[in-house]
Image (cartoon, rainbow, N blue to C red):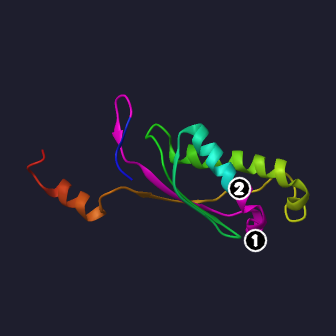
Amino acid sequence: MGEKRSNHTVYNVNYHFVWCPKYRHSILEPIENSLEASFSDVCDEYGYEILSLHISPDHVHLFLSAHPKHAPSEIVRTVKSVTARKMWEQHESFLEKYLWGSGFWERSYYIGTAGTVSTETIERYIERTEHV
């Protein structure tokens, strides 16, 4: 998890996302392998780097790094919509027993940010006068 570079940017932007399938049904375990592949595909396609992924039966933890040009809400919307579409394409007969309509993920999600320094370190830096 080091700094990354693009043409005009040096960055280290990491997000921890958590979300659940509709109605918090425990449906992810049987489709875990294809869901993991789907996460990998969409992140590769959009330039997000998966740092860690954990798929539980009723929720997902995704820790990723992305260029700062990508808003967190854009990232989660993209990942959730693409993976949902792929899961319905691949597992429709299984999913229709638990879900109805075209929904797969709950609309809500958790997001946390992480970098290489702690909050205290940043606060101390800001309070110092010699950096001005």
- Where is 26 relative to 1, above or below? below
Please give the name of the residue rendered at 32% of the width and 57% of the height, measured from the top-left corner. 116
On the image, the x and y values in percent for residue 33 come to: 71, 59
Residue at x 47% of width, y 44% of height = 66
Residue 26 placement: quadrant: bottom right
Quadrant hosting residue 46: top right
Please tell me which residue is depicted at 25% across the width and 64% down the height of the picture.
120
Disc 2: which residue: 35
Bounds of the magenta span? 6-35
Q: Quadrant of the C terminus?
A: top left
User: Image quadrant of residue 105?
Assistant: bottom right
Q: Report x, y in % for residue 65.
A: 47, 49
Name the element at disc 2. Answer: helix
Question: Marks 1/2: CA distance?
Answer: 14 Å
Q: Is residue 20 magenta?
A: yes
Three-letter residue code for mark 2: Leu
In this orientation, does residue 78 appear?
no
The residue beneath circle 1 is 26
* Residue 129 vs residue 112, the one in the foreground: 112
Dots 1, 2 in contact, CB < 8 A: no
Label 1, secondary structure: give it. loop
Amino acid type shown at disc 1: Ser
Looking at the rendered image, the disc whose residue lies closer to the viewer, 1 or 2, is: 2
Q: Position of residue 23 (x, y in %)?
A: 76, 67
Is residue 120 toward the left or the right of residue 46 in the image? left
